[in-house]
Amino acid sequence: MAVAFQTHDHARCTDSAMTNARAICAARGLRLTPARARVLEILLEAHRALGAYDILERLNAEGKPAQPPTAYRALDFLVSNGLAHKIEGQNAFIACTHPDRDHDAAFLICRACHTVAEAPRAAASGSLGQAARSLGFKIERTVIEAEGLCPRCQGTTPPC
Amino acid sequence: MAVAFQTHDHARCTDSAMTNARAICAARGLRLTPARARVLEILLEAHRALGAYDILERLNAEGKPAQPPTAYRALDFLVSNGLAHKIEGQNAFIACTHPDRDHDAAFLICRACHTVAEAPRAAASGSLGQAARSLGFKIERTVIEAEGLCPRCQGTTPPC
DNA sequence: CGGGAAATGTTACTCTATAACGTTTAAGCG
DNA sequence: CGCTTAAACGTTATAGAGTAACATTTCCCG
Ligand SMILES: [Zn+2]
Ligand SMILES: [Zn+2]
Ligand SMILES: [Zn+2]
Ligand SMILES: [Zn+2]
């Protein structure tokens, strides 16, 4: 975990993540189309959060002129299937580092180098500070938001 | 705490919050100007997160034509001084329910009625789930983001 | 092969947020 | 009190993020 904070063989890191993503999609009957795969690659290469328009720029730089919906559709797919996450505090997206299952996650985001480490959700269920401390990460600001149903709305509202 | 989930005398609730805000600003030498006070009132009355443009609409409805910077400046002031918070997951703002000090906070947001309860940061340092359970809130999705300095960037980067 | 659903392309638009600059207001001081 | 100066505000324009709507293509499945 938190490989992002260590120097590592990043080409390998990206490759194995792509292979893993393909396997996951195959297993679940999901279509990792070229457009979606390319966006995931872009996210994996960056190893940090990218805005939808950053991704668009990269796509356009490759000769394929793309409009916003192209990027957002791919991102929606990746996020809904747990292959990427949205960093709400930055309106940006990042590839998931352990996409075994649909999951919420907790993030440690460096404001200096912009590296993002994803902590398994369990670490944050307990104390986020603990996870940070064990990584040597110094927290300056947190965004903690839980969405769901309040006591009054339970039972009176459809589950989705 | 979490008064938002209970029916309560909301006029009183709003009044006392405004009085409190005035006292805090006086004590800290901050200027709670009419524009800022009005935005805070609007937030308090709503008792839920409002977008900057929702606030603008209300301001304009009162005969004072206002442009975006007017709302954003007031919101920036309120947020930097701990009198309001930004809900990143919704690009929206909410009045703080216990603005004794500058603080991060954790939020429980009902997706049905949009009520927002602010849990003291301490509750989330431990387990957010625990705080939610004790309120009867059913969590469906969480946004947990910590910003700060990663091990590599500490010492090499100015503190602000 | 054909029918239908999923995915894409394309255009236009909405919502969110800030830059930049000039004017007003008001706190602080001799 | 009148002066200085910084903070606050008004205004215009523009940047950045996200979506609606509809036509077209792709591809799965029978
Ligand atoms: Zn890597
Ligand atoms: Zn993940
Ligand atoms: Zn608060
Ligand atoms: Zn509710």
Image (cartoon, coloured by chain):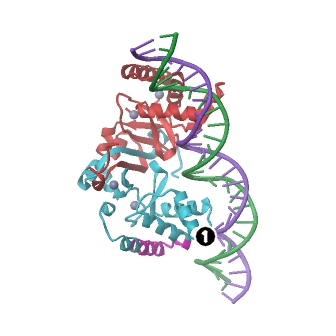
Chain colours: A red, B cyan, C green, D purple
Amino acid on which the number 1 mark rests in the picture: Lys
Ligand number 2: quarter of image: top left
Is residue A19 left or right of D9 when viewed as pictured?
A: left
Q: Element at badge 1?
A: loop
Image quadrant holding the N terminus of chain A, namely top left
Residue drawn at 36 percent across, 74 percent down: B12
Q: Position of residue A41 (x, y in %)?
A: 52, 26
Answer whether residue A142 is visible to the viewer in this image.
Answer: yes
The rendered magenta stretch, by its main secondary structure, is classed as helix
Q: Residue furthest left?
A: B134
Q: Which residue is mark 1?
A: B64
Is residue A146 left or right of A93 when viewed as pictured?
A: left
Is residue B11 left or right of B56 when viewed as pictured?
A: left
Question: Which range of residues does the magenta coloring cover?
Answer: B16-34
The answer for which chain carries disc 1 is B
Residue A26 versus residue B153 in the image, above or below: above
Residue A20 versus residue B17 in the image, above or below: above
Answer whether residue A47 is visible to the viewer in this image.
Answer: no
Q: Position of residue D21 (x, y in %)?
A: 57, 39
Image quadrant holding the C terminus of chain A, namely top left
Total numbered circles: 1
Q: Position of residue B115 (x, y in %)?
A: 37, 57
Taking the magenta stretch, the answer to whether it contains residue B7 is: no
Taking the magenta stretch, the answer to whether it contains residue B17 is: yes
Residue C20 versus residue C9 in the image, above or below: below
Residue B2 quadrant: bottom left
Name the foreground residue: A89 vs A154. A154
Q: Position of residue A19 (x, y in %)?
A: 44, 19
